[in-house]
Image (spheres, rainbow, N blue to C red):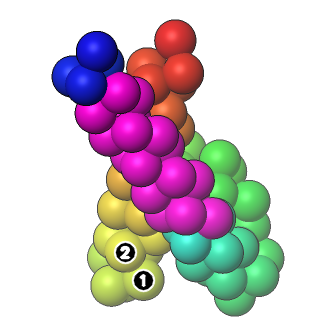
Amino acid sequence: MQTNQAVKEAVQKEMELGKFVLHRYSTKLSRFEKKYNMATEKFIKKFEEGKLGDEQDYFEWFALFKTKKHWEDKLKQLTA
């Protein structure tokens, strides 16, 4: 019985962390969207097509998007 409770608590803590991380990354992504006046989805498409330059911001923006996506997928798995 204790093992089940420990697992539930660990999953709950991971979900709480995931929600916190998602909020932080969403805030950071919003800053890039405002700075470059472009939705993240549009940016990702252009970036992956090589239509943007090699600015450091672009690589950070891309990494934030990928990490946010990772946490979204992880939270889906945890809630399944």
Residue drawn 56% across the image and 72% down it:
24
Quarter residue 49 falls in: top left
Quarter residue 79 falls in: top right
Residue 55 visible to an observer of this rendering: yes
**Rendered position, 34 above or below 67:** below
Residue drawn 46% across the image and 40% down it:
12
Q: Position of residue 23 (x, y in %)?
A: 63, 64
- Is residue 55 located in the magenta-colored stretch of the structure? no
Q: Nearer the viewer, residue 59 or 9?
A: 9
Q: Position of residue 10 (x, y in %)?
A: 32, 40
Residue 52 as seen in the image, left or right of residue 23: left
- Is residue 19 located in the magenta-colored stretch of the structure? yes
Describe the element under mark 2 as helix, strand or loop: helix
Q: Start and end of the magenta stretch?
A: 5-23
Residue drawn 25% across the image and 25% down it:
2
Residue drawn 46% across the image and 69% down it:
61
Q: Which mark is residue 57?
A: 1
**Circles 1, 2 touching at the beta carbon (< 8 Å):** yes
Number of labelled discs? 2
Instruction: State the residue position of label 2.
Output: 60
